[in-house]
Amino acid sequence: MTEKAPETDFDGVESRRAEKVVTSSQAKAWFVREVLPLEAMLTRFLARNWRNKVDLEDFRQEIYAQVLDAAETKIPDRAKPFVFSVARNLLVDRFRKEHVVPIEAVAELDTLNVPADEPGPERTAVARDLLRRLQSGIERLPPRCREAVVLKRIEGLSRREIAERMGIAEQTVSDYIAYGMRILADVLYGESPELGSGA
Amino acid sequence: MSGIDSKRSSINEAASAWLERAHSGNWTEQNQAELEAWLTESSAHRAAYWRLEDAWSHASRLSALRAPSPQPAARRRFLPILARTAAVIAVCSALGVIGTKYLLSPETRAYATGLGGHKTVTLPDGSRIELNTNTVLRVAANADKRTVWLDKGEAYFQIKHDAAHPLVVFAAGHRITDLGTKFLIRQDEDRIEIALMEGRARLDTDSASARARSTVLTPGDVAIATADTMSVTQRPAQKLANELGWRQGQLVFTETTLGDAASEFNRYNATKLMVSDPAIARMKINGTFPTSGAEMFARVAQHILQLQVVRRGDEVVISR
């Protein structure tokens, strides 16, 4: 392993690389640090090559699952080429199953030239745009949902306290918060503007 | 609202429901175990949960949106309570305008490791807590208070001392108050062990039994408490250092019985070592192994101690 210094994320949780065995927390740290910042690029790649936008979330989940399965055995040396080769294989597989292989898609997949995994612009972009993205995510939420998210994340109120303050059922608070969590993650990583109105 | 509907169409929705629940202010060890079971079920679950969890953790930075300084991270310290309250009120009245600096009440966060896991939690003041295998702890820390609950397992504490706001750990009915300290707490089924490496700490047993007592531990002290007994002994520094081998992923055995060594490995691994014969279990060994090295250990027993080693499913049985 090349890294000696522990990695610390924003929550102060760090993971140490051990000799051979990849622990769950190592795989997680790698996933959060290396894979999630690729999501916007991955989403664009999938959207270009697959017409039906409804499938994209499933694709993303499937790709992440495969990537993580592999990482839990051995952390790939370079994240980006690995993630995109998984994505490519998944698309090829889906094309086969649909018995329709769009010619331009295959052409693009074959020429897909994934750059080396340097400190890529996508990662620094995520860091730099963090606040802007979060803000636009918050603004995209419906007003009541936004109110619940602000009370939760900024003020740190419990579910019950939010329910009391807003005069709504605790289950509704849960639904608002969970929805807010999904939208914030999409905006932070996926950058897929149409997700806000869809569902 | 009995919780998570496992038949949800979308894994992402299920993951967000779990995450919401974990932050709801009403989260038990039982819930944590259920969540871990769900995460263990598939890598798709883990990916979805970690993704949302990471985004949600960043969302706390929303509080910095209105900060005048472009370096919010360096400035997100603590305002006087009045100012914070005012800021929160401002947020509440002008929804969508996000202007507070920090959370008003300490948010309790849960941290857990699975079998063989190892995780370090850094508190805002720079104090560090290292979780060993199969451990659950909760932390509530803000400017006024630092409280930790060790619900199960073992953790090593390196605490930045703050006389005005001592860190307090609750574990198995005992209260450990740091007085500037490095210490280790290990909780097994029927006993808890507190080993002090540096500094001082005060141990209070909250036990209802008549002899509730308070003891100040100094370096080298090891307090061992069961339901109704408590004793404090001195242990040599080298031995204490060995007990922290797990921080480097190692188990260090010196004059350790085979039985004890097997139980140590079993704390870290799904494959369980069984020593079938009490006479063998009393054999003493020395050596250093990776915590994940149960099978390596079994091979050593086989070739060096000339014992029989047989694998049966998830068990490795060591016999004569």
Image (cartoon, rainbow, N blue to C red):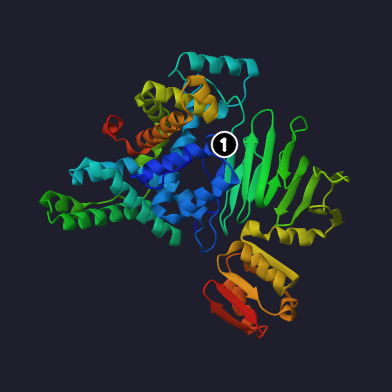
Is A112 in front, or is B166?
Answer: B166
Question: What's the residue at 67%, 67% (across, down)?
Answer: B263
Question: What's the residue at 37%, 53% (across, down)?
Answer: A65
Report whether residue A45 is seen. no
Tell me: B97 left or right of A57: right
The outermost residue toward the front is B2
What crowding class fits label 1: few (fewer than 14 Cα within 10 Å), some (14-19), or many (20 or more)? few
Rendering quarter of residue B249: bottom right
Is B92 in front, or is B118?
Answer: B92
Relative vertical location of residue B44 with respect to residue B286 in this rendering, above or below: above
Rendering quarter of residue B15: top left
Query: What is the x, y in percent for residue B246?
Result: 65, 59
Query: What is the x, y in percent for residue B72?
Result: 52, 27
Relative vertical location of residue B80 with respect to residue B313 in this rendering, above or below: above
Q: How many marks?
A: 1
Query: What is the x, y in percent for residue B178?
Result: 77, 40
Report whether residue B234 is seen. yes
Relative vertical location of residue A95 with respect to residue B73 in this rendering, above or below: below
Figure quadrant of the C terminus of chain B: bottom right
Tell me: A182 left or right of B189: left
Q: Quick one: SS at disc 1?
A: loop
**Which residue matches tag 1?**
B26
The outermost residue toward the right is B211
Relative vertical location of residue B188 with respect to residue B138 in this rendering, above or below: below
Is A119 in front, or is A81?
Answer: A81
The amino acid type found where label 1 is placed reads: Asn
Chain under callout 1: B
Question: What's the residue at 64%, 34% (across, down)?
Answer: B141
Query: What is the x, y in percent for residue B251?
Result: 66, 65
